[in-house]
Image: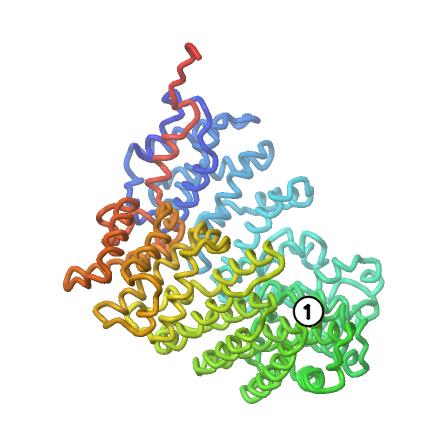
Amino acid sequence: MSLLDILRSGDEGFHENLDDTLISKLCYCLACPSCNKILSLDFSSSDFVDSVEHILTYFVSDSQIVQPDDHRLSLLKIVVYLVLTHVECFPEMMSRIQELFIQSSNNNERILLLLLEAIVCCCNKAGPSTDVDFLDAFCTPLACERLYMQLRRRTNHYKRILITSLFCHLTLRHQNSSNSKYNEIDFLPIRNSCMNMDEDGRLFLRTLHKISSGFHTPTVPVLIDSEFPLTSEDLRKMSLEDKVDILDIMCMNSIEFTKSGPSDVIHLFKSSGNLSVICTKVIRNYFGRRTCAAGPLWPFILELWSKSVSECLTFSRASELYPLIEPFCRNRIPDLPSGSLDSLTPLLCDFLRESVRGAYCQLHEEACRYRTWVISTLTAFVSDSLCLAKLTEWNSELRFRIKTLSLQNLSAVCNEFKSLLVLSTRVCTLLTSTDFSIALAHIQFMVDIAWGLADPVLIYFAECIQETLCSASDDQKCQFADDLRRLLLRFLSRSLKIKYEDEDELENDKIQQIRAILPNLALLEPVSEWSDVSTSYFISIASFLTSEDAIASKLKELSDVRGLMLCLLITWMISRFHKSVSGVEAQIPCHFNDWLLNVTTALTDYELTEFMDSYKIMYNLRNRFRLLKELFDTDPDERFQPSLVRLYQRITESFGADFCIEEADSNKCPSCGESMTEIIENILITRSGSMTVDCVGG
């Protein structure tokens, strides 16, 4: 079964539709250069050329087909992708597709959408530096004019997106070939929409920025040799959303008006009112996209917003401050260029110090809420634009406040406590880039605080520990493996012992804590030594999982928790192989062999194939089990034999005797992760009408 079989299916009695999802997958694979290399078919063979020509001739010769057969439409979709990505194999077919493109722009919406989708997809896959010769061939002045008319009708949003994307790709190709500092769009009918900043023009400019960002190339502005087109009266009549959209686009550096500078534009918007609210929404949009603006208008927007926030902080206008900073409390702002926040940083630093040590420390509700808002804002704005000395100073202040609050009734200051932990962790991750011992000290600090708490706030600590370790490299974790393991095991040991009044809250919190900590713990290098302290905590956790506790039973039902614990168990067994019995192990109530077998059974007495959903678990389980088996085969250790036998039995039952031999799937594309061979087979197997149905009897 092959791609050729699918192309020929239109004439071989396959009257039902092909699976549209699989057809789309196949087309995306055809547009992927890596997939084509793996498949390595000779598309220039006469069989392929004849099949492609036959399908195209059917559609081109009958240009009045309003409702084409769905099956043939699926075949046309494959053929179009095939020709666009292998032009050299089908040189005569391009003219047929171009003819079909012109015809469909007049009288067939479905075919037009199919062709637009294929052209845009192939351009996206090709990248900015690859010549796509067919683009100019399709986008003749007449074709562009017709497409622009379709765009203006606004009857189909998806079609508008495709047409706009096509215009953007055409613009980027021209800019790339000319090496100009600006995007030229004089040849496109959408130019007037950009000049007027109307809805279609703004959609084009936003899409242009999005495609450039997807190609990881800087956005080159469209140059308009005129003044900014809108007056203060025009802006006053506009909705708030439209005004935000216009400033948002100008901050993207997507357009530049030669006769109006940033200050001129800002002056116009000032006269329209609500400028601080508009600036807040523009900044939030950028930080929500986790990108940094590059347009000349951006510093003005940031400065205006900073000034408004500064005034609120100076005069303690909590009600006015909230709408300015609340949108940022949900997002961490990406690192900004040095000096971006110079005007705001001193005030924020002063306020932090005051809120941590000064008059605002009284525990009434309004003060707590006000502090929490500001702390959340600080978290958003902590970036490399602050010097290391300032970050270190903040860290010291934050730890003082966290420790102070931990000694009080946390239910009254829970939100502030969480915000402080998050801010402290953000500061720590920036400091960790140069020294992992700072991260280790931060985790030590959080574990020490958590160890003395009985309140259900440990989930905050778990999330912050997870965040801290995300900023560390594997080499850093390996270097401090034993210290890190000891701290993480200590935290888990503590969290499993805490009792809540609300059983549902207890179950949910403990699952979240386990899932936050266990991946970092279980995936540490298996060859490093375990200290007695780490072993003690591990035995406590493993014993808990073999108990009759309701939470232990629930945790064992979760395949990811069970898989990671199994990795951790094997890692510990490797570290203890042929070591004398430690004092900690000697204190296990039952015989060591029996205890280890009980733990192994508890973790493997489920369906192990569930682990196949997680590449990380399978990869690490395979490597660790292979290492343990090699150790045992070389020099058996009787203490581990019953458990290893149990492990081997369950693993081979689930994954086969060759589980330890890692096999690469050569059919999978390294770029998109799909297997074109698999998709083709599935299309032929799952097509409607391919099954024989017995209609006789019940």
**Image quarter of the C terminus:** top left
Q: How is the image coloured?
A: rainbow
What residue is at 58 percent from the left and 77 percent from the top?
Answer: 424
- Is residue 565 rendered to the left or right of residue 168? left
Residue located farthest toward the top when viewing the structure as drawn: 696
Q: Nearer the viewer, residue 679 or 575?
A: 575
Q: Residues within 10 Å of mark 1 (few under 14, many from 20)?
A: few
Q: Secondary structure at mark 1?
A: helix
The amino acid sitting under disc 1 is: Ser
Give the residue pinned by disc 1.
Answer: 411
**454 up-or-down from 693: above or below:** below
* Residue 79: % across, % down: 41, 36
- Is residue 407 rendered to the left or right of residue 130? right
* Residue 623: % across, % down: 28, 60
Residue 112 shows in this picture: yes
**Image quarter of the N terminus:** top left
Q: Nearer the viewer, residue 8 or 557?
A: 557
**573 up-or-down from 651: above or below:** below
**385 up-or-down from 52: above or below:** below
Residue located farthest toward the left when viewing the structure as drawn: 634
Q: Nearer the viewer, residue 30 or 617?
A: 617
* Residue 14: % across, % down: 40, 23
What residue is at 33 percent from the left and 33 percent from the top?
Answer: 4
* Residue 615: % across, % down: 37, 54
